[in-house]
Image (cartoon, coloured by chain):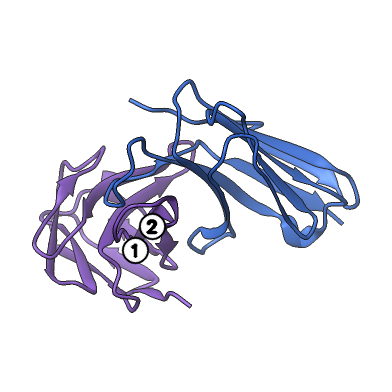
Amino acid sequence: DVKVTQSSRYLVKRTGEKVFLECVQDMDHENMFWYRQDPGLGLRLIYFSYDVKMKEKGDIPEGYSVSREKKERFSLILESASTNQTSMYLCASSSGRGGGVSYNEQFFGPGTRLTVL
Amino acid sequence: TQLLEQSPQFLSIQEGENLTVYCNSSSVFSSLQWYRQEPGEGPVLLVTVVTGGEVKKLKRLTFQFGDARKDSSLHITAAQPGDTGLYLCAGGPVPNFGNEKLTFGTGTRLTIIP
């Protein structure tokens, strides 16, 4: 089974702090994604990466950055946390190899519920 | 911009009843996936449909992809409390080379009352 793990289930930070959210997948997947999920707004893509050191902006990249130095690890960074970044953060990965519909199937981690005070 | 609208947004029914959830778009997708998310957890993939008109069954759940690959439905027979959760549909891009993002639907929050 694909396993995607996230470094914390719950995190409380103060406004202005630098926050790191870590995600690790163990299935040698090419693609990794960071989403945030808020009531009434659904799942929104922040950034994704289809290769080591490669990244693409999603729908809401402002206030976030990412790092992918190794294939299995994708980090989301909040440079200066703000209260409007309080949310559930979900990491996902997909195989992505060679195209084909099954390679888009995404496997999610359990999520990190971040509260910024 | 591709959009996927799900309906209804909320659904609360008694155990044992049947229900259908819809996922609609004006865009064509290469595939359509359904996920279920339980409170406090990440979404879990239930099924992928890839051919227009395709029907897949997963125990009491029946998934159908529209003929034109623009819409999908999820039908649950004899709903059980364990079916409670947020159901998300997601569309794969056209063309599909394997390194693109999915388009996620707005979600249907289903509650089955014992």
Instruction: Specify the subunit that label 2 lies on.
Output: A
* Viewer can see residue A83: no
Residue type beneath disc 1: Ser
Kindly indicate the quadrant of the structure image that contains residue A12.
bottom left
Q: Residue at x 33, y 51 (%)?
A: A35
Residue type beneath disc 2: Tyr
- Rendered hue of chain A is purple
B73 relative position to B96: left or right: right
Give the vertical position of A13 relative to B56 (above or below): below
Kindly indicate whether the residue at mark 1 contacts the one at mark 2 (C-beta within 8 angstroms): yes
Closest to the observer: B97 or A72? Answer: B97
Q: Residue furthest top?
A: B26
* Residue ID for mark 1: A95
Local SS, label 2 = helix
Q: Measure the C-alpha gap from mark 2 to mark 1.
A: 5 Å
Q: Where is residue A54 in the image (x, y as percent from the top left)?
A: 11, 56
Q: Answer with mark 2 or mark 1, whichever residue precedes in sequence.
A: 1
* Residue ID for mark 2: A103
User: Do the residues at discs 2 and 1 belong to one chain?
Assistant: yes
Q: Residues within 10 Å of mark 2 (few under 14, many from 20)?
A: many
Kindly indicate the quadrant of the structure image that contains residue B81.
bottom right
Give the blue chain's letter.
B
Local SS, label 1 = loop
